[in-house]
Amino acid sequence: METNTSCKDIEVTQFYFEFYKDFCDADQCRTLEFAPEKAFDGTRLINHLIRVVEVNVARFCENVCYMEPDCVSINLDKRTDRNGNYKCELNNVTREGHKKDLREDQYFFHHSAESACVMNHCKNNGTCQSGFTDKGYRCLCSAGYKDSNCGQDVDECAKGTHTCSANAVCTNTKGSFKCTCKTGYSGNGNTCTKPSTCKEIFDHNISNKSGKVILHLDSKPISVFCHMGDFGCGDGGWTPIMKINGSKRTFHYSSHFWGNRKTYNNGAGKNGFDLQETKLKTYWKTSFSKICLGMKIGQQLRFIFINKTAKSLYSLIADGKYRATLLGRDTWKKVVGPQASLQQNCNREGFNALSDRRRFLRARIGIIGNQQNDCFTCNSIIGFGTVGYLSCGNKAALQPDNGDKLIQAMGYILPSVASLHLGNQFRYLLTAIAFNFGFNAYTKFILNYVKASVARTNAVSWSLHLKKHSMAHGL
Ligand SMILES: [Ca+2]
Ligand SMILES: [Ca+2]
């Protein structure tokens, strides 16, 4: 190496080494030899850089490498910067076995140490570090392995270093471990809870796939099919409440099931969007802020949703009182599809939507229409828990907007807790600003913003004005 190292530099280097060695205990002690025959002037090893350091004495570069446990070779940039410092590159491999990464570069000087890690002795992706222990290397094992060569599995379950929930069983595996929720609990093993809604399962990342889960209502387990993700009602975890066959009378408007706390055919709650009817305990146990309504007509499944906060669906329906919604007739028609038909007037919608005269159409959830401009004699409906030959679907007669209809649908009712939508977040943000800066500052901020906008508008009209002016004067 052609450097202008002075006597003083060497003394400093030696001192540095001795100083460091005083502090090194048996495990940490390192011996790294940079033999002169492995020094190559005009060469640079690329692609294996750990980091770059600046040294004010060229020979310090090897010392810094010595103190960096992963470092086994260096590239020194022989040009000094304006402060007289050299750039020293620390690499985690030597030139042995990496000849393809050697580049000719007149400004650089490469020096590889003797490394026992040229042959990697560390198993299972362990990191080999040269110069440690009397074997000439040591292994830093990847998680799950131990022993000097990382060949031994760590029994995390026995050692207590696992991350399983207290409600899970830990099983040791090679290189890792497995957590399985105990009977009665649901989860991914790290979290095992007794969730009461599909939304909880979705939000706690226990599962984001639709499928059968156990919910705990009143600490009693029930098996249901959770619908996860966005299938037409927005993202989230959707808990089933009811499945209604439009051609059967089980959930007809006058069925006692709308007013009581009795379940029907619990087993069908596990099956997803199939043709079996059910009413689950979730009817009176599950609170929600959003309720998803689905109709299956033939093979076509369509959904709409209502943003409505309630203690339960029971609390909205059982007392028979009308509770309005504001979806609009076009949205209600979407759940039926292009063949949907309604009369033009009335358009009463929501929970317990009834014609004002008995014996005319009514729905537990839905919209009713009339050809007369009132709600007395409604002859069209889209809904769930309806009357006549229809417990769920679309019926229309007497001048409806898309022809007479009697469409019996399979209906699905699933509630969830709505996530904050963007509107709310924005309001929170503004509140946060107001809170942090005090109300005056907030007002000032808004006023300045308005002023700036006004100033900008003036500037634009000004420049326009000037332009016109100068044109008029032929400038
Ligand atoms: Ca293990
Ligand atoms: Ca009528």
Image (cartoon, rainbow, N blue to C red):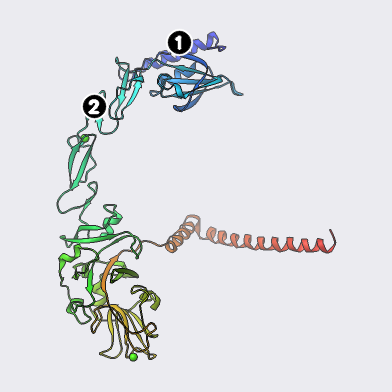
Instruction: Give whichever of discs 2 and 1 has the lower sequence position.
Output: 1
Q: In which quarter of the image is residue 242?
A: bottom left
Q: Quadrant of residue 255?
A: bottom left
Helix, strand or loop at label 2? It is loop
* Vertical side of 170 occupied by 431: above or below: below
Helix, strand or loop at label 1? It is helix
User: Tag 2: Cα neighbours inside 10 Å, few (<14), some, or many (≥20)?
Assistant: some
> Would you name the residue on which mark 2 appears?
151
Name the spot of residue 344 as percent of width and height, x first.
Answer: 40, 85
Name the spot of residue 183 as percent of width and height, x first.
Answer: 14, 51
Q: Which residue lies furthest to the front in this view?
A: 298
* Vertical side of 119 occupied by 463: above or below: below
Q: Quadrant of residue 2?
A: top right
Name the amino acid type tagged 1.
Glu
Q: Quadrant of ligand 2?
A: bottom left
Q: Which mark is residue 37?
A: 1
In the rendered structure, the answer to whether residue 441 lies left or right of residue 161 reads right
* Vertical side of 210 occupied by 397: above or below: below
Q: Which residue lies furthest to the top in this view?
A: 7
Residue at horizontal 44%, vertical 21%?
99
Residue 365 appearing in the image: no
Name the spot of residue 143 as percent of width and height, x first.
Answer: 28, 33
Q: Quadrant of the C terminus?
A: bottom right
Give the CA distance from mark 2 to mark 1: 35 Å
